[in-house]
Amino acid sequence: PAEKFDVIVVGAGPAGNSCAYTLAKRGLKVLQIERGEYPGSKNVQGAIMYANMLEKIIPDFRDDAPLERHLIEQRLWYMDDSSYTGVHYRSDDFNEEAPNRYTIIRAQFDKWFSKKVQEAGALLILETTVTDLCFSGGKVIGVKTDRAGGTILADVVVMAEGVNGVLGTKAGLRPRPKPDTVALAVKEMHFLPSDVIESRFNISGDEGVVIEAAGTITRGMAGTGFLYTNKESISIGIGCLVSDFAHTGLAPYELLETFKKHPAVAPLIAGAEVKEYAAHLIPEGGYNAVPQLFGDGWLIVGDAGQFVNAVHREGSNLAMTTGRIAAEAIFQIKSRKDKFSAENLSIYQKMLESSFVMKDLKKYKRLPDFMHGARDRLFGSYPELVSKAAQNWFRVDGKDKKSKEKEILRSFVKARGVRGLASDAWKLARSWR
Ligand code: FAD
């Protein structure tokens, strides 16, 4: 008879690795299948990694994980074509013994994580694509792959196949993500000596800076840009909803080229050597786009479940957390020698509901619709108005300050009307609750 596993995990990204690691550590017989030639070869991230969520899985990860820089400064830029209006937060408190956020390079990080998974006892098969889920009486009982051989059996299959995964969709278990719920992001790695990066960003040692940007850089489409410091490189990228790209006909690389030439960005990457270019989807539909997450013999974790908090640029941590929680749910059922029925696996959903994952997605559930509906203003006229207002305010030109205030107010009212402004403010406040 074919070999049977307790659990098959499809995918070796942060969600799959967290799930497989947690299960293998608890003694379950785990098979993990990854289509890439090595874990991370198919994966793209900015990338900021959030320590707290990894600590819950591998507490001593700092001993040997490939980490780039720990973040001490966050810059949020609202940009028009020649300026940005920004909020910067920098604190020496972030220079703590166990820093909270790091930049990483996914190809290295995923390889490291996968090694831990294998050391914990899971069996990993690479360069193998899971082509189908296998059912018996409506229950998932295993998978088929593109390799010779029949079905591989397991009590439960965890789909950690990422946003592009077609497995769940093919089996009719999760809908194909709609174009207005996924962003297409492009990213480049610009290499510079570490001392150049440190002087340009006013940092030293392993300190790092994050820049998150929005505004006219996405030409009225709903999206954001980013710039992250690694040890000897800078990751720079930009992304927008796929539906917006389809609507405008603009290409992602055109946005990236313009973003790189922005007068506030160009000096930061000047003289760098571009060595890598990548494109990937990001699920950004939020709470309302989360599909059914469990059923008879199956669970969905990570990007495949639309677990991304687009406002806070968090994805890998939700992937790790959903992977870990799925493993804990499976372990509970296994420990009491119970069946992996939909009813029993629904505990996964309940555990997610009481975690930050669902609470955060729920908090922002109205935001994707608001951002989309107001995209011509949020990523078009408003950043220009904000920039003009700031410039008017800061220019010392003999004009009295009361008149400046009136001019600024008038410019906003002229552009959108009092009711329009009030409506946008109300909708923003409501979608932020
Ligand atoms: P993935 O990392 O996509 O892993 C899925 C894996 O499954 C892949 O290895 C794939 O090869 C494999 N697979 C798929 N189908 C099959 C199959 N049928 N058979 C076998 N293997 C299969 N998140 C952050 O937290 N911080 C950031 O700074 C950040 N920046 C980002 C920037 C960009 C440009 C992008 C695109 C994303 C960013 N994210 C960020 C999001 C983050 O990358 C994802 O949330 C995270 O990678 C999701 O992990 P995952 O394990 O669910 O999926």
Image: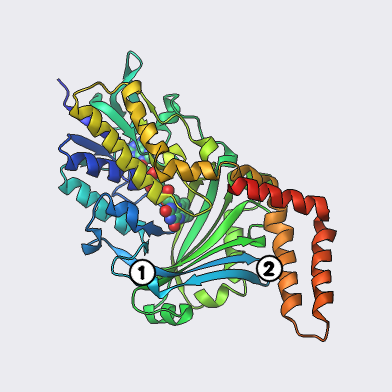
For residue 174, above or below residue 373:
above
Using the rendered view, name the quadrant where residue 8 is placed.
top left
Q: Position of residue 211 (x, y in %)?
A: 51, 66
Task: Compare residues 344 and 429 and report the one nearer the observer.
Answer: 429
The answer to which quarter of the image holds residue 84 is bottom right
Three-letter code, disc 1: Arg
Which residue, given by chain and number where applicable, does mark 2 sit on? 81
The coloring applied to the image is rainbow
Residue 425 position within the rendered picture, expressed as x and y whole percent measured from the top left: 70, 52
Q: Does 340 sit above or below residue 318?
A: above
* Tag 1 secondary structure: strand
Q: Residues within 10 Å of mark 1 (few under 14, many from 20)?
A: many
Can you say which quadrant of the picture contains the N terminus? Answer: top left
Mark 1 highlights which residue?
69
Q: Amino acid at mark 2?
A: Asp
Q: Is residue 122 at all visible to an observer of this figure? A: no
Can residue 356 be seen at all in this image of the molecule?
A: yes
In this rendering, position of residue 401 left or right of residue 213? right
Q: Residue at x 41, y 59 (%)?
A: 47
Q: Earlier in the sequence, mark 2 or mark 1?
A: 1
Respond yes or no on whether mark 1 lies under 8 Å from ligand 1. Answer: no
> For this view, does 45 lie left or right of residue 417?
left
Q: Position of residue 399 (x, y in %)?
A: 83, 82
Q: Residue at x 25, y 62 (%)?
A: 62
Percent position (x, y) of residue 26?
A: 17, 39
Q: CA distance from mark 2 to mark 1?
A: 30 Å
Q: Residue at point 80% right, 72% down?
A: 405
Q: Residues within 10 Å of mark 2 (few under 14, many from 20)?
A: some
Q: Residue at x 75, y 65 (%)?
A: 385
